[in-house]
Image: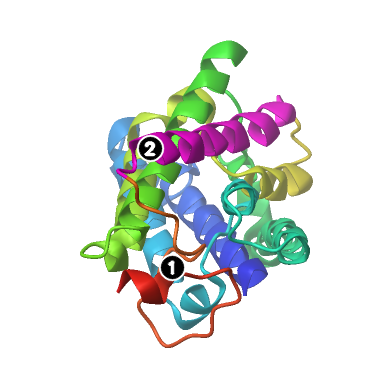
Amino acid sequence: MEAAGLGTFMISACTFGVILEHPASPVHQAIPFPIVRRVLMGVAMGLTAIGIIYSPWGKQSGAHLNPSVTLTFFRLGKIAAWDAFFYIAAQFTGGIMGVLMISTLIGAWLTNPAVRFVATVPGAKIPVAFIAEAVISFLLMLTVLFASNTRNIARYTGVFAGMLVATYITLEAPISGMSMNPARTFGSAFSAQIWTALWLYFVAPPLGMLLASEAFARLGDGRRVQCAKLHHDNDKRCIFRCGYASMV
């Protein structure tokens, strides 16, 4: 389910990347302003993330879709080591397979320099891009932790996450490429053979999210992390060290 979730995200990213950025696309030609195209890309990917999180499989797996998220919940003691290992393996597999699958349909369009398999590469100097990736990852994880562990708004955690994804793509993407996700970046890099500053996307997002877990421990007003799911208000089985029942 985690592999399919990130694979679906990558298929969506590649498809909308071609529609909005390929020079031959009628949509690209009709919208000459990059900021407007980034807004549309942000909305598309934010809605994709929300759809995956609230899908039956997203509700079942918890919809991490990101090794950084899984590592953070592991650090917080909500995931067994064996489960964390397989989640991360599945996320990398899904990221690669999603791009490969869509490549069989529109591969020639994805290779265009304006699309490049929607690879994430720094748009600013490496230190600036590193800080930007760490900051957006920190804010996303902190939002997830506060929302998912606040009874009245826990069910909307996925909406908040999707809104942040849309905002980041619109405003932050020109700085770091807006990844927050090592598996997402590797999935594109594998097909595009673009390895520019790959280490940045393996270090900054986990660092930002792990720092968010430390901040939550200090700012959470005594709230405990109840579960590792982004959406728990459903009837799906939970494999995590879950305390959600005590919260509701």
User: 28 or 60, which lies in front?
Assistant: 60
Question: x, y percentage for residue 61?
Answer: 56, 73
The span picked out in magenta is: 196-221
Question: From the viewer's perspective, is residue 54 above or below residue 165?
Answer: below
Q: Main secondary structure of the magenta part?
A: helix
Question: From the viewer's perspective, is residue 3 above or below residue 126?
Answer: below
Question: Does residue 215 show up magenta in the picture?
Answer: yes
Question: From the viewer's perspective, is residue 23 above or below residue 183?
Answer: above
Question: x, y percentage for residue 109?
Answer: 61, 51
For the C terminus, the image quarter is bottom left
Residue at position x 45%, y 26% in the image? 174
Q: Image quadrant of residue 55?
A: bottom left
User: 72 or 26, which lies in front?
Assistant: 72
Numbered disc 2: secondary structure:
helix
| Residue 33 can be seen in this image | no
The residue indicated by pointer 1 is 53
The amino acid type, in three-letter code, at marker 2 is: Tyr
User: What scheme was used to colour the molecule?
Assistant: rainbow
The amino acid type, in three-letter code, at marker 1 is: Ile
